Image (spheres, helix red, strand yellow):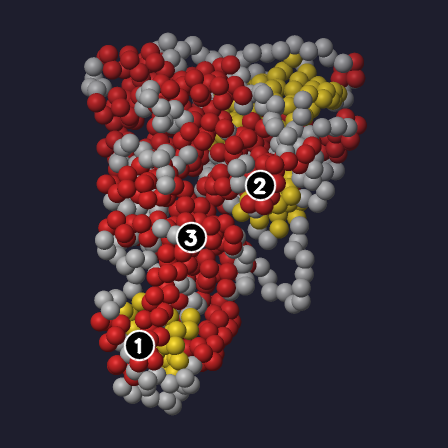
Amino acid sequence: MTAAERARRTAEADTLCATAYADCGGPDTGIALVAVGGYGRGELAPHSDLDVVLVCDEGLEPGELAERVWYPLWDSGARVDHAVRTLPEVQRAAEDDLRVALGLLDVRHLAGDPNLTLRLRTHVLAQWRRGALRRLPELQRLVRDRQRRVGELAHLSVPEVKEAGGGLRDAGVLKALSATWLVDVPHVELEQSRRALLDVRDLVQTLAGRASDRIAPEMWTDMAEGLGLGDARAAQVHVRELGRRITHLSRLSWRRVDARFAQPAVVGVRRPALVPVAPGVAVSRAEVVLAKGARPDRDPLLLLRAATVAAERDLVLSPLTAARLARECPPLPDPWPDEARHLMVRLLASGPGLLAVWETLEETGALDSLLPEWEAIRMLPHASVIHRFTVDRHVVETCIEASTLIREVSRPDVLMVAALLHDIGKGRLTEHSVAGEPIARTIAARMGFEDEAIDLVARLVRWHLLLSETATTRDPDDPATVALVAERLGDAEALDLLAALTQADARATAPQAWTTWRAGLVRDLTRRVRAALRGDAAPARVVEEQVAVPREATRGRLVLEVEAVGDGSRVTAIAPDRVGLLADVAATFALQRLPVRAARAWAQDHYGVSVWQLAGEGLDPALLRERYEAILEGRLDPQPRLSRPAARQALAPNVAVRPEASTQSTVLEVRADDRPGVVYLVCAALARLDVAVRSAHVDTLGPQAVDVFYLQEAGAGALSDSRAADAAHAVRSALGGDPLPPA
């Protein structure tokens, strides 16, 4: 089915209407017969209605014409949706009813007075543009309600090409948005997808023999033949891809509408502000774009950096920017540098903002350079009808769900990458978890993970169904059940990661995949397996290093040694040990806005030693020492600058005492948003209690800081239970979490 056939049907209908009007003696002035809606656009499907209105100037009575003109249309067998209105009545109806206004935007002359039609069209467009700021919120509510009610064309098991999200109704709304002149709607991409979807609708109605917009499962083979595609699978991918593209354009356009409403009123024409937010990245009108002077050809990380900024801030990643970065950024080396992996994990853990950004990466081809294996699952339908989404969208939804669970695992970076890759083996002849394991191993290695993490990612992908399937099909009281799971996972870390992945995977599948009953079964099995694994696990030991103490440190001063490493710096800090030393060093880096990727700190004889992996390059030790001395002498108070209200945190911080981890120290584990000052706030809170940090292990895994502190009383020895509770309470309060009363 082609545009030419739609044009032919429209021309035949136009001739029918014009002839009926002329045969009834319709006048050439004062009255006009017009087409609206899809007929007005000239896009009649094989079984479309003819939407027509007989419009009269105010004061004119159409008389018998208002009845006689419809009979020839009915006699022809056409389905006619008709009305008779005066020009003021049409204008009032458009003002009062949003649906009427949308239909009239496509008004087209058929017969009678062409000047009347022109006046009507001019008034309707002017009225639409004049009232757009008032009417668009209502239109947005209608669109969202319909999409929630019907679902998305890309994911429905029985696609609905008109009313579903990403269908023809959404495409028509986008044309109406464009007509407001308030927002930029990607016209070329929209028209290509809309016309292709019109071809699909025409074929659906031809095959159904009636005015239907639903593609039944048995129609796909005939659809493939009619569309000139290889098979039913190709036809499904084609239709769902059109729906995905229109959905993406719809989200993008409505985000621009939201940004337009958020802008303060301005007088005159102003250039949009360009606010730098990261190296090479800026924000303009709620869209992430390239900063002035950015050189994509010299920065292979710029695409990931821009995508991460957009997702974390829940902003639009400009499609033009993404497409340019895909073209111009050099390919990432194999393996990726640490910063690239860190950015990817942050992107995956960004929460709801990930979806729109990921779709932009897909639509612009930018994802191909980052994850070429993605193409194998793109638009792939699930074999199980329980799934709400295609495989690729399900994977993104799993990442969004997993981002809420990163506080519960020791390796959130491994969790997020496993969530991304857990279904990467689908679409192959081998069972997908078996096929996915070597693929996941290859990808994790390319991303630059260490061997242990690569093995962990591969193990999670291989066994990502283990907990859910075992919990619902095996007897948990049978020792063999627990032994099977324990043997396949090997350790408690993998178990905790798999428990989180299982929950995220199920939630992303459908509500019925994670009922209270199912969740209880999985939790019970996880508890039993953890108990079995704990019996074989030894307590964690503190591993200390030895460094040479410089002479300057023996004289009581802080010594800072800076070493360039890859795309960052390693800073070693040595000074006479005291309560609060680590807090002051951490504040020095935080006030310089130096992101901490990792750090280790320990007591060596009478000196405090800490080694920091920082993201900054070209650091000046003298400048850092000056900042440290200002903090030490009280001339600079870091507390006001580094504190942050809890309301700005995506997840509440998790602060826990781990009594099983050491017999010599009290182990405090802290998980919180990665932001400047986390280590300082923790250590400062402990210093105010006169608690010494014997050893610290700081890691930044994606968007989360995972810090473990081995604490002792200043005079040596582990903290009492009450002191440990006081310390946890103080740290939790310092990080902005809900304060808990000391035990």
Q: Nearer the viewer, mark 2 or mark 3?
A: 3
User: SS class of the residue under badge 1?
Assistant: helix
Q: Taking the image as drawn, is residue 184 in sight?
A: yes
Q: Dots 1 and 3: beta carbons under 8 Å?
A: no
Tell me: 205 left or right of 296. Answer: left
| Position of residue 73 in the picture relative to residue 636 (left or right) | left
Q: Look at 30% across and 76% down and name the residue there.
A: 20
Q: In this rendering, is residue 631 above or below 487?
A: below
Residue 109 vertical position relative to residue 695 in the rendered view, above or below? below
Provide residue 557's location: percent of width, then percent of height: 76, 22
- What residue would you read off at disc 3? 195
Q: Which mark is residue 186?
A: none
Name which residue type carries label 2: Ala
> Residue 412, can we see it?
no
> Which label's residue is closer to the chain start, 1 or 3?
1
Dot 2, crowdedness within 10 Å: few (<14), some or many (≥20)? some
Q: Earlier in the sequence, mark 1 or mark 2?
A: 1
Of 161 and 94, nearer the camera is 161
* Residue 628 position within the rendered picture, expressed as x and y whole percent measured from the top left: 73, 30
Q: Position of residue 289 (x, y in %)?
A: 62, 45
Q: Which residue is mark 2?
A: 323
Q: Quadrant of the C terminus?
A: top left
Cα–Cα span, label 2 and label 3: 23 Å
Q: Which residue is mark 1?
A: 20
Disc 3 residue type (three-letter): Arg
